[in-house]
Image: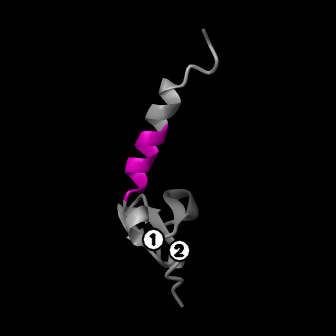
Amino acid sequence: MANDDQWWFDLKTKSAVSEPKNASKAVDRLGPYASKEEAERALEKVEERNAAWEDDDWGED
């Protein structure tokens, strides 16, 4: 039975999935996310976080 409260982004198929057992291996998925829309934005969110991390000066002067 699908859990509508949890979604993953399947990196191999580039799609949001609600049933991880029908998706690629766990290493090829991002999530879980609270909604399909959130899962569909997974790569966008990763890019945002990477950019923020690169911009962080790590306390350097």
Task: Classify 56 as above or below 38.
Answer: above
Q: Position of residue 3 (x, y in %)?
A: 54, 83
Q: Residue at x 47, y 36 (%)?
A: 50
Q: Position of residue 22 (x, y in %)?
A: 48, 78
Q: Position of residue 23 (x, y in %)?
A: 47, 72
Task: Classify 19 as above or below 59.
Answer: below
Task: Classify 2 as above or below 29.
Answer: below
Residue type at mark 1: give it: Ser
| Marks 2/1: CA–CA distance | 6 Å
Q: What is the secondary structure assignment of the residue under circle 1?
A: loop
Q: Which corner quadrant holds the C terminus?
A: top right
Q: What is the secondary structure assignment of the residue under circle 2?
A: loop
Q: Residue at x 51, y 86 (%)?
A: 2
What's the mark number on residue 58? none
Residue type at mark 2: give it: Gln
The residue carrying pointer 2 sits among few (fewer than 14), some (14 to 19) or many (20 or more) residues within 10 Å by Cα, namely: some
Q: Position of residue 36 (x, y in %)?
A: 40, 71
Mark toward the start of the polypeptide (2 vs 1): 2
Task: Classify 38 as above or below 23.
Answer: above
Q: Which residue has dot 2 on it?
A: 6
Quick one: which residue is furthest to the top in this view?
61
Q: What is the span of residues highlighted in magenta in the rendered image? A: 41-49
Q: Residue at x 64, y 18 (%)?
A: 59
Q: Which residue has dot 1 on it?
A: 35
Would residue 59 be found to the left or right of residue 11 on screen?
right
**Is residue 5 within the magenta segment?**
no
Quick one: which residue is furthest to the bottom in this view?
1
